[in-house]
Amino acid sequence: MNRVRKRFWAVMLAAMLLLGGAAAESGTADGWQFDERGWLTGENPGDAYLREDAEEGIWEYSTADLSIRVKRYRDTKTVKKVSKIIEYCIAEVYASETNPLFSIMTPASKKKPAGYNKLKPEKLVAQNPVMLAMSDDYYGHRMQTKANGSASWPIGIIIRNGETLATTTRNSTKKRYFPPLDTLAVYGDGSMKTFVCDELKAEEYEEQGATQVFAFGPWLIRNGEINEAEAGPDSKYYAYNDPRAAIGMIEPFHYILITVKGEPKSKYSGVHMSWVAEKLKELGCVEALNLDGGGTACMIFNGKTIICGRNEVRPLGSMIAFGKISE
């Protein structure tokens, strides 16, 4: 990375984080100047601003066309008369056409597509250096289990970095198994849109210009409305506390990513899917998809894991990424 300098603010500019629900405001800190999106503007000490404060639970990164603000939260709740912690990280990202959301994957081989093979998340990021990476729909696992005969589930419609990797999905008229393989498509204009699993075919996503299609689900928010049947407060659809991961869009190029810890269960409670949907709606998301949780859920900032769903993180074949780091 060119001329990245680590600096810690004496006083955090709370207005730089949307995470409380208020719009970000332009400001300065220790010689750095930011616009309302958190992008660098004006004269600055370097090309990229970087802050890492694990003790305070704050991680920040800004360039002239990308800003990432991650904050860790800890709440408490009583479960069967036992006090437990809800720990989660929320990342607010202002991306751009020149610095968009993309995917990192294990490389393709002659017989297997990119993302089929798996690596520990930190190793995957080390081989594909990025500033922020989060677990996704774990499609490589479905490919592997189907190939070796240990599971017969469809893979879902999968597009990564403009390349279609899988086209089979579930039938929405039948029982909704988990994961239902609902999708979230990301387009070149920075917009995101959720769909029921078989609402569109792979070629229709291609025709629409989707650069990424994630398949897991259920969809959490669509056109500003929560999926009450499967992610509402009264839903019985897999309604249990668990580590979670999800991604949503407030507006094109403006995203929220969330990862919730759930282990050890003696200390952390995890959350219901409805909690995630309500949190994303509260933060302004109009489209959002539930991603694979449990031991898949993790978030990595500048090569280091800052939160994971369980103590033992699964090897992954692909991750959602922002901020490619130059060698």
Image (cartoon, rainbow, N blue to C red):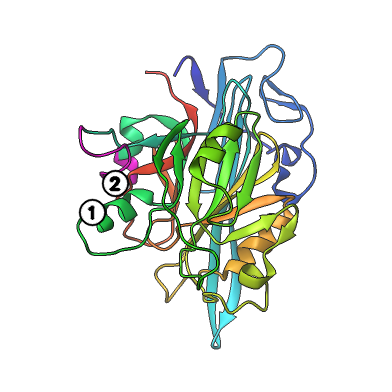
Front-lying residue, 44 or 241? 241
Viewer can see residue 320:
yes
**Mark 2 residue type:** Lys
Categorize mark 2 by other alpha carbons within 10 Å: few (<14), some (14-19), many (20+): few
Q: Quadrant of the C terminus?
A: top left
> Residue 127 in the image: x percent, y percent?
31, 31
Boundaries of the magenta span: 110-123
> Residue 84 in the image: x percent, y percent?
53, 75
Residue ID at (49%, 20%): 4
Categorize mark 1 by other alpha carbons within 10 Å: few (<14), some (14-19), many (20+): few
Are the residues flagged by discs 1 and 2 in contact, CB closer than 8 Å? Answer: no
Q: Which label was assigned to residue 183?
A: none
Q: Quadrant of the N terminus?
A: top left
Residue ID at (30%, 51%): 143
* Residue 241 belongs to the span the image colors magenta: no
- Helix, strand or loop status at disc 1: helix
Instruction: Look at the picture and state if 291 lies above or below 205.
Output: below
**Mark 1 residue type:** Ala
- On screen, residue 65 versus residue 215, left or right, reads right
Q: Quadrant of residue 152?
A: bottom left
- Helix, strand or loop status at disc 2: loop
Q: Which residue is mark 2?
A: 120
Q: How many marks?
A: 2
Front-lying residue, 106 or 171? 171
Residue ID at (42%, 76%): 266
> Residue 57 in the image: x percent, y percent?
55, 48
Q: Which residue is mark 1?
A: 147
- On screen, residue 257 versus residue 150, left or right, reads right
> Residue 94 in the image: x percent, y percent?
65, 33
Q: Nearer the viewer, mark 1 or mark 2?
A: 1
- On screen, residue 231 versus residue 84, left or right, reads right
